[in-house]
Image (tube, rainbow, N blue to C red):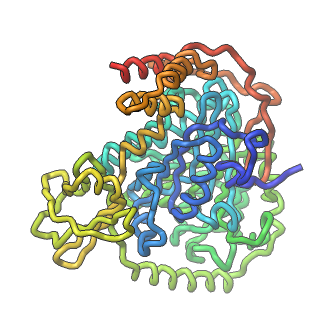
Amino acid sequence: MTEELDLLKAIAGKRGESKSGAQRRGRFKASIISTFNAYLPFYEDVVLRRLVASGCHYNVLLLDSGEFSQGLSTATTWPRMAGRSYTLVPMQARGAFHPKVALLVGKKSACVFVGSHNVTLSGFGANRELTTQVDLPKGSEDPYAPLAQAVWTYLEVWLNHQVDHVPQSILQGALRVATSFAPWLEAEGLQSGDVRFVGNLPEEGSLWDSVRPMLPEKAKEVVVIGPFFDRAARFLQTISRDLRPDSMVVGVEPKTVGFCRQESLPKGARVVDVSKLGRGSGYLHAKVLWVNGGAGDEALITGSANPSSPAWTEYSSRRNAEACLVHLGESARSLTTTLGLRSIDSMPELGIEEILAIDQRVDQAHQDQEKTQSKSIVAAEAKEEEIFLHCKGLAMEEVKDVRCWDLKKDNWRVVKTIRYDCHGFFVEMPPKEVATTQFLEVNFVDGRRLRAFVHHPASIAKLSRPVKQERFREALDSLDSESPDLSVLIRLASNLIFDEDTPELKTKSTLGKRKTKLRTEGESPIDSLSVPIGETKQYAHRARQLRGDDLSYIIDTLI
């Protein structure tokens, strides 16, 4: 029996769920999600709210900075809660920042999602997407812990790559997902088994360089499906050259695909209409590469990478950041059967006239795209009595004025006190005004406009504190009031020290890569868009020990 994965429910929980009936309520404490583009009202009003309602209070969203900029054309799509209720990081890559990854972590477990979905209404519902869920009920002791660690390493490297255009407090806020909630993610483990994570890093080789060693030496059959191809079919030509397939089938949705030119297709490649592949009739946004080497030697690659050269083979300034899962052996065989890839040969083949019609439509779309103008957005950082605008290379004489958007008053106000150094602008204002500022807008003499959202580190830091620590801090602050409640303070301090629910801390190994045991027979915590591969038994209850950082926190606060 197979069923589709409800991505919103799987990541953010079910709306209206009672605490006793919630599948994962309280299981996860922090999340980090990466996406190419996002409809921020959907993330803030739906995804974020459900995450918080399920007990996941610390959340991070990474998205392509160019897409973020274009999404701010109207005030209705501005991020109203970014920098206060969650950490938003505009990401830059040579090409596009394109991975679709979600990592949820808690005290005793974690969950990874890798797929083709953007954080939009369409990505989470209307489109035909392909996303795989890897559940880690045993957390750091789970057989798939090395996979989660590989995901975190990938995100961490890309975050550290943003230091030239994102304030340090934003990057530190994103990295806190591991440092504060799941330190075991920072260890290195050797991925094994039939599902492995692969992502291309800023200063390393291409995605194809990483995936090719896992594929059969020679392919009996190759199936490629995607919504966007490079016009010169460079990636398809790479597949044909390196894998030498006896048969290559390219599946497209003719009405929507951004396809390569007909004359660029590899010799012998067949193009078929996969409009009816899978359930539903939504836009086909899934990406698939299936390589069948025969005799059971198969590999299925799913994730964010379109079948194009920027995604797979580019080394130049056009190379995207991508992330995918490589399914091997039984995992690949099972998924390809359920997804209907083994019967793709019987789907309608497109003739030359139909492919030429796609060519004409795509050429026109490219011309329209070139006419669009890009916009600029940067991130600003709230300090005690000023806001720092992280932008180098600007001169004060170029600036006409600077305005601030007041979140409470819901209007713009002009700022008069500004200073500038080699790092950027410093907009000075009273602390109360700093606290209510959500956006800065720099208007230049030549008509240009630079808009920045404001990150509030103090607000984000509160989200990373355990609830009991936050209550203890509030009780401690009450000592300066007229009616301090010592009994509450003592009770909270006792709870922090002797809390039975506090997990044992794991010491991070610095001795190199840590080998982990292979998955035992019957364990299969992977769940895909179409196939729940299995369920794993619940993590057995074990004795807790005193957590040192809680005690240190109390001592530091009292001192």
Q: Quadrant of the C terminus?
A: top left
Report whether 233 appears left or right of 408.
right
Of the pair 314 and 535, the residue shown nearer to us: 535
Residue 160 at x, y percent in the picture:
37, 42
**In this view, which residue lies farthest toward the left?**
397
Of the pair 342 and 490, the residue shown nearer to us: 490
Residue 311 at x, y percent in the picture:
51, 57
Q: Which of the 4 image quarters holds residue 4?
A: bottom right
| Relative to 22, residue 3 above or below | below
Q: Say which residue appears at 63% left-offset and 22% top-offset.
A: 501
Q: Say which residue appears at 40% left-offset and 56% top-offset.
A: 90
Of the pair 513 and 13, the residue shown nearer to us: 13
Q: In the rendered picture of this protein, how many numbered marks are placed on residues?
A: 0
- Can residue 508 be seen from the camera position used here? no
Report whether 442 appears left or right of 367.
left
Q: Which of the 4 image quarters holds residue 249?
A: bottom right
Q: Which of the 4 image quarters holds residue 134?
A: top right
